[in-house]
Amino acid sequence: MSNAGADSGLFPQPFSGDPDRGYTQFFAALKSTGQFDLVSDPSGADLVLELQLIAPNGPSSGNKQNGASDPVPMFRLRIYDRKTHYILWTLTESIEVALKQKTHDRNFDQALQNILIDFQRVTGKLPTETH
């Protein structure tokens, strides 16, 4: 897994921690699923993941009826085929807007969880729910 970093201006506000927070949390969550064999050397992997936290530029007061809106920070997960270096999937999850630091951090965590679920879905490893 590769840490593609985070755009400037996101830490320590609106999100607590540092620019490695997303990568560290995602790696730990991926590992804790027990569904994937994580290797330290990409040459031994089938897929290579690249996680990036981006804060895109855009309109500051767009007309939402015409499709323009203020962009929000989002996670982008690129999934490469290790052998060919071709991108197989690109997944994005926006981080919901908040007013308080605690809510910003909760929304950050939720977006990371969502991107993990998206990854599990495309790899066919989405856990089945038990009732």
Image (cartoon, helix red, strand yellow):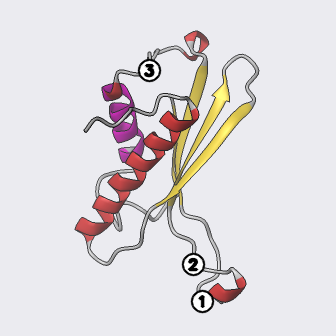
The one of 114 and 77 positioned closer to us in this rendering: 114
Residue at 42%, 40% (x, y): give it.
Answer: 23
Report, in whole angstroms, how far the alpha carbon at label 1 lies from the one at label 3: 43 Å
Q: N-terminal of the two: label 2 or label 3?
A: 3
**Mark 3 nearby-residue class (10 Å; few <14, some 14–19, many ≥20):** few
Q: Which label is found at residue 61?
A: 1
In reply to whether residue 74 is colored magenta, the answer given is no
Which residue is the site of mark 2? Answer: 70
Q: In the rendered view, would you say 60 is above or below 74?
A: below
What is the three-letter code of the residue carrying label 1? Answer: Ser
**Where's residue 20, x and y in %?**
39, 44
The one of 128 and 88 positioned closer to us in this rendering: 128
Which residue is the site of mark 3? Answer: 36
**Where's residue 13, x and y in %?**
34, 67
Mark 2 touches mark 1? (CB < 8 Å): yes
In reply to whether residue 23 is colored magenta, the answer given is yes
What is the three-letter code of the residue carrying label 3? Answer: Phe
User: Is residue 3 visible from the viewing direction of this image?
Assistant: no
Tell me the chief SS of the magenta region.
Answer: helix
Viewer-nearest of labels 2 and 3?
3
Report, in whole angstroms, how far the alpha carbon at label 2 lies from the one at label 1: 7 Å
